[in-house]
Image (cartoon, helix red, strand yellow):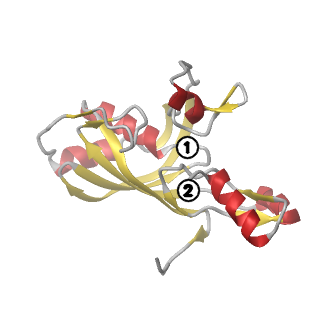
Amino acid sequence: ISSNHFLARLKRKYGVKKAGFSGTLDPFASGVLLVAFGSYTRLFQYLEVEPKVYEACLWLGASSPSGDNENISKVDIIKPFKPKILSKNVENLQGILDYTPPKYSAKHVGGVRAYELARRGVDFELKTQQMEVFSAEILHYTHPFLLVRLELSKGSYARSWAELLAKKLGINATLSALERKSEGGFFYENILL
């Protein structure tokens, strides 16, 4: 569900009129979403919410216009990569990077969320931006799935980072899973499902 839909459910559950969150969590993703009620929403400006830490599972060879496994359009069978090649390319995707936000993102285009326009099939372009990748590391690789841990600046997209890695490797890739582990010093652990 979208961050706004989740927030609306919390407002109903707790009978609160005013609530907000520190940063939109991709509807495809799971994980940390900082929520405040009432006048406490004003405190977000004082919170350190960087880096945003994600664990992202990339499906190497899969292609999707949304950058996730919701709209897989094609799957290429590709040979496994040597770990050294993957490590080198992941290492090179750190620091300040230029990227184009995904069309299936929460960016506003003329007052409407980009993902809403993309789902309706509206043609539009998003401007190139910069993101800072504080660190990127491979956690696990079982071909064709690559699990990475990313520490990103506020407003960055793990989907866009995955797209940049795929271009460097000369393949298609999409996210098969995405979890926000923390925002700055805020994280969760030992959650019972």
In the image, farthest residue toward the left: 79
Answer with left or right where residue 109 lies relative to residue 67.
Answer: right
Q: Are marks 1 and 2 in contact (CB under 8 Å)?
A: yes
Q: Percent from the top left, x then y, of residue 180?
A: 50, 59
Q: Quadrant of residue 165?
A: top left
Disc 2 marks which amino acid?
Lys
Q: Quadrant of residue 18?
A: bottom right
> Does the image show residue 48?
no
Q: Which residue is mark 2?
A: 52
Secondary structure of the residue carrying numbered label 1: loop
Mark 1 residue crowding within 10 angstroms, few (<14) / some (14–19) / many (20+) = some
Q: CA distance from mark 1 to mark 2?
A: 9 Å
Residue shown at 46% from the left, 77% from the top = 193
Residue shown at 64% from the left, 58% from the top = 6
Residue 51, relative to residue 76: is it above or below? Answer: below
Secondary structure of the residue carrying numbered label 2: strand
Residue 139, relative to residue 64: is it above or below? Answer: below
Q: How many marks?
A: 2
Residue 181, relative to residue 193: is it above or below? Answer: above
Answer with left or right where residue 31 lies relative to residue 3.
Answer: left
Q: Which residue is mark 1?
A: 156
Q: Percent from the top left, x then y, of residue 161?
A: 43, 41
Residue 66, relative to residue 48: is it above or below? Answer: above
Disc 1 marks which amino acid?
Ser
Mark 2 residue crowding within 10 angstroms, few (<14) / some (14–19) / many (20+) = many
Q: Percent from the top left, x then y, of residue 105?
A: 55, 38
Residue shown at 40% from the left, 31% from the top = 65
